[in-house]
């Protein structure tokens, strides 16, 4: 690793560093308890169950879920979204999705469309990566089974009109799935306010948990008809070859990552009031985007809003080289490329090589932010002079 001090600016990928308390909780559980949840009645197994139960209840409270049984745990956000998509869709279903989605949504939907299972409509985005609510709503038809809209773009930070779309289709037979990967833990996320039936998010981003954690919210009205994606042991009803019919057991085959959940519990407890946290993120976002836009010659793809996420391109320097220089010469760690978002770059004009993405967090300091802007400004100046 370089001797330069690290300036981590890739929080849209995963938050870092994790708090000492989060790491300590994971180590403590592994050393002191270390057993599987739902696999025994002895004291240590009960303790593992209690960890899972507490995290489930905490997340249910944070997102205004009707009960903790609406929350199932998964290995990552991609797994949670796959469970939602494959658990909901059947032959000849129609799905509406936005071009702002992550490949965690687009690839399973493409798989189903390619195999002739579903019919898919992709709604375009505006030049800042935002979705026009009316265009999305008009794409929903009488036979649309599922509408999928991310809460925020992972490329531009644009907050999408999930609540407006959800309210418009609430009285129809269409269900609403929201990917809250970029917003859970950064801004208030409420399934009631968003008018959604399904919501997925990982734990390792703005909520400060470790990798290997994620949840899926499933509305009570879908509990019985929702189909499991994976099958296996659940620690209950072992005499049956059928998966349990009850939520969340029907969606949680195999062992849960209890050490990671123990860490995530601490991270969730450490979250400040989310309205205050949103204010912190908005201040950093404003400073980041304004600072990048002030650098002449840099093309910035960002949406003014609460998330400190912005993408940029520079003529004469590929995004991969741009990011490599930032890392090697300035210790600034950012992501370059298409950011696992297959469609959105067609509307940003960056489909060839993608962008350099800058993403901060509530823990980003003014010194770090200024160092990033100074580094970008110096690179841009050197390219323009060459």
Image: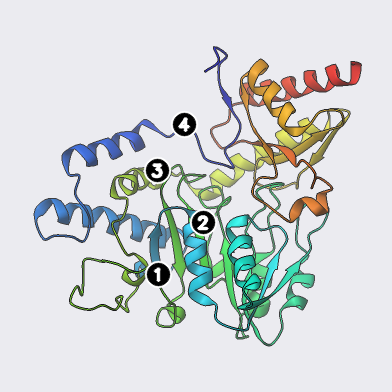
Return the disc, 1 or 4, that comes first in the chain's sequence. Answer: 4
CA distance for labels 2 and 4: 22 Å
Q: Residues within 10 Å of mark 3 (few under 14, many from 20)?
A: many
- Percent x, y of residue 220: 43, 77
Q: Residues within 10 Å of mark 1 (few under 14, many from 20)?
A: many
Residue under pointer 4:
17
CA distance for labels 4 and 3: 12 Å
Residue under pointer 2:
78
Return the disc, 4 or 3, that comes first in the chain's sequence. Answer: 4
User: Element type at marker 3?
Assistant: helix
Query: Residue 267 — which label?
Result: 3
Residue under pointer 1:
70
User: Element type at marker 1?
Assistant: helix
Return the disc, 3 or 2, that comes first in the chain's sequence. Answer: 2
Residue reaching furthest right? 385
CA distance for labels 3 and 2: 21 Å
Query: Residue 367 — which label?
Result: none
| Residue located 36% across and 31% down the image | 20
User: Element type at marker 2?
Assistant: helix
């Amino acid at each position: 690793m370089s001797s330069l001090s690290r300036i981590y600016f890739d929080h849209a990928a995963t938050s870092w560093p994790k708090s000492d308390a989060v790491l300590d909780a994971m180590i403590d559980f592994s050393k002191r308890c270390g057993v599987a949840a739902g696999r025994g009645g002895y004291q240590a197994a009960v303790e593992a169950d209690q960890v899972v139960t507490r995290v489930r209840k905490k997340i249910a409270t944070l997102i205004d879920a009707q009960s903790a049984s609406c929350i199932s745990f998964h290995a990552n956000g991609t797994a949670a979204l796959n469970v939602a998509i494959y658990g909901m869709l059947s032959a000849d279903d129609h799905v509406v999705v936005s071009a702002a989605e992550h490949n965690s949504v687009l690839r399973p939907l493409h798989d189903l469309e390619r195999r002739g299972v579903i019919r898919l409509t992709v709604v375009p985005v505006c030049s800042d990566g935002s979705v026009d609510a009316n265009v999305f709503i008009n794409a929903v038809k009488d036979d649309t089974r599922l509408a999928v809209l991310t809460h925020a773009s992972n490329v531009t930070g644009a907050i999408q009109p999930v609540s407006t779309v959800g309210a418009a289709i609430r009285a129809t037979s269409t269900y609403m799935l929201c990917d809250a990967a970029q917003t859970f833990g950064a801004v208030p996320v409420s399934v009631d306010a968003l008018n959604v039936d399904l919501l997925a998010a990982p734990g390792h981003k703005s909520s400060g948990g470790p990798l290997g954690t994620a949840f899926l919210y499933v509305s009570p009205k879908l509990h019985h008809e929702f189909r499991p994606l994976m099958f296996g042991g659940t620690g209950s009803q072992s005499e049956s070859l059928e998966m349990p019919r009850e939520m969340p057991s029907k969606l949680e085959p195999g062992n849960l990552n209890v050490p990671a959940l123990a860490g995530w519990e601490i991270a969730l407890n450490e979250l400040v009031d989310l309205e205050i946290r949103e204010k912190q993120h908005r201040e950093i976002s404003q400073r980041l985007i304004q600072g990048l836009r002030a650098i002449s010659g840099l093309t910035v793809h960002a949406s003014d809003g609460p998330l400190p996420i912005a993408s940029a391109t520079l003529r004469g320097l590929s995004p991969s080289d741009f990011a490599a220089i930032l890392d090697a010469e300035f210790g600034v760690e950012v992501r370059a490329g298409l950011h696992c978002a297959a469609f959105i770059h067609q509307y940003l004009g960056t489909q060839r090589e993608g962008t350099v993405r800058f993403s901060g967090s509530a823990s980003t300091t003014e010194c770090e932010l200024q160092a990033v802007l100074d580094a970008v400004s110096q690179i841009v100046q050197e390219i323009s002079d060459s």
